[in-house]
Amino acid sequence: MKLGFSYIGLIWLIMLFVPNFIWMKNKPKGYEEHVKKENKVLLAFERVGQFIVTPAALIFANFNIHKITFWSAVLLISFICMVIYEIFWIRYFRSEKTMKDFYRNMFGIAVPGASLPVVAFFLLGIYGGNIIMILGAIILGIGHIGIHIAHRNEAWGKKPKKKLPVRIILGILKAVVILLLVVVFGFFIYAITGRNINEVKRAFEFKEGINEELYVPLKNGDGFVRLIGKDQNNPVILSLHGGPGEPAGYAEYLCFDGLTDEYTIAIWDESGCGRSYYRNKEKGNTMLPTPQSQQEDIDSLVDYLRGRFNQDKVVILGHSYGTVLGSIYISAHPEKVTAFISIGQVVSFKNFASEHYAYEDALAQAKAKGDDTTELEKVYKAFCDDPNVVSMQPLRQATSRYHQETVPQAFTYADLVCSPYLGVDDVRWTLFEYSMMLGNTAFEASQGELLADLMGFDINERYKSYEVPVMYISGSADWTCPWTMVKEYYESIEAPKKAMYVMEGCGHVPQNQLPDDLNSAVKQFLKSA
């Protein structure tokens, strides 16, 4: 929820109030007699709803138009409701102004003078992700629509009953529609409520620090960055996500909030993906990312962070593919780096080395247990015949049976849905990324040279010595980047200070399983470094 003037809310209120002011001198004949019979409970709901909706429409800037997205369709439907509402009034003012004229259906919509604005403001709340408006519209609807349904029944009388078969069919159809609406809007209300609660909590939690989203001009385009910390004088950690092309910045606060009391975390959607991708696409920048451009943009971002927070150096934290970017960067620019935290270090993806490594271990375990290895060998052969990201998935699924994680995820899908940072572009990119599993090659194409470069990466051939302290964190059940490969590499390198922390029972993303343990280990290492 973002406080600020809403011109959209003002327009909606003008469309609501103007015809009502005119109506006050053009009420239906005998209307006041019906008012005397209004249900006091429904009237109370109506008044409370009006009290909530009217100011809420004006004071939240989320209702304004920012850019065209999926949510724009919700705003458009809301506007259409208000337009039909105006047409309803035109029809009424041109009529004889009887109670029946006032309560005549429009386009099959019952009590349109009451239901249309309620639906419009409810959808405005969905569009703006604002639970105050949503609840206000629901309360208003209970009272306002309830009152006018009673008036309509008084004006028109009860409808004659339809034949039983017709009533049954219509009843089933109504039940299905109502159930569908409850499920769909129930989900949105749940997500928006959780999001708003988290937004308010974090506004208080970080009121003395920083909780900001922005686009930073980098060497090869704008980069989306989220800055979170409780004190802007704290050292800075730059987080490099996995992939390539797998940002999850809207969820990283769940993993790294435990660091924000002592560090400011900069979470970046790397060049060519996520919000950074859509921002540059909108500006006409269609440059595909390359290993060189990634490093140039990291350097630009590091310089920005050093300048903004008055720091000589920053900590680089990388996960999975982010450890590739981090290893390269700290080797090229040690003078700008305090330390390197590597989670799930990529040692070698050359010729899919880690996949073969994981397969051999799974096969050995299967044979030791006397299991049928036919399916396992089949998917491995298919992978070897055509090694790529798509054929890798069935292989990982088959080997995972022998590489079970024993530590559960610390977060649920509900936590992700209720993230205060989840945006339309995050959802768009996730769907685009997963379309690869359906054979869509557009995602791979969007990553330019990065995937091909990763498939040729072997850290043992590049870096055996670092000028900054380095810490490697791995899950004991990580077979995407096997921890034993990381351990062998760790033991072979030289650095001013080095440490390795194996998280028992965790997989490739231990920060999602034991975030407190991981953050405590990181803090301890950085203090000693």
Image (spheres, rainbow, N blue to C red):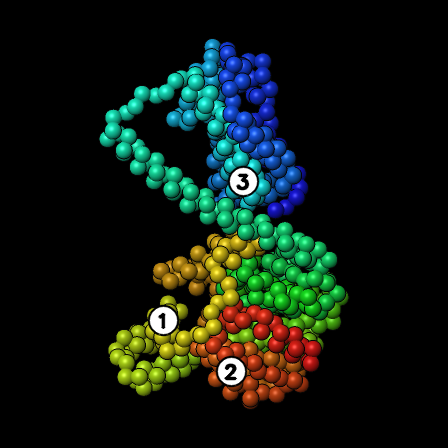
Q: Which residue is drawn at 60% across and 58% down?
A: 224
Residue 349 position, x and y percent, is 45, 77
Q: In this view, does 95 lie to the left or right of 21?
A: left
First in sequence: mark 2 or mark 3? 3
Contact check, label 2 and label 3, Cβ < 8 Å: no
Q: Which of 112 and 201 is in front in this view?
A: 201
Which residue lies under the disc numbered 3? 134
Total marks placed = 3
Rendering quarter of residue 493: bottom right
Q: Is residue 180 in view from this perspective?
A: yes
Q: Residue at x 46, y 45 (%)?
A: 186
Residues under labels 2 and 3: Cα distance? 50 Å
Q: Which residue is drawn at 59% across and 40% down?
A: 64
Q: Nearer the viewer, residue 67 or 529?
A: 529
The amino acid type of the residue labelled 2 equals Val
Q: Is mark 3 on a helix, strand or loop?
A: helix
Residue 505 position, x and y percent, is 47, 77
Q: In which quarter of the image is the C terminus?
A: bottom right
Q: Is mark 1 on a helix, strand or loop?
A: helix
The amino acid type of the residue labelled 1 equals Gln
Residue 427 position, x and y percent, is 48, 54
Q: Residues within 10 Å of mark 1 (few under 14, many from 20)?
A: few
**Mark on residue 486?**
2
First in sequence: mark 2 or mark 1? 1
Kindly report which numbered mark, 1 or 3, lies closer to the viewer in this rendering: 3
The amino acid type of the residue labelled 3 equals Ile
Residue 185 position, x and y percent, is 45, 43
**Mark on residue 397?**
1
First in sequence: mark 1 or mark 3? 3
Q: Nearer the viewer, residue 525 or 155?
A: 155
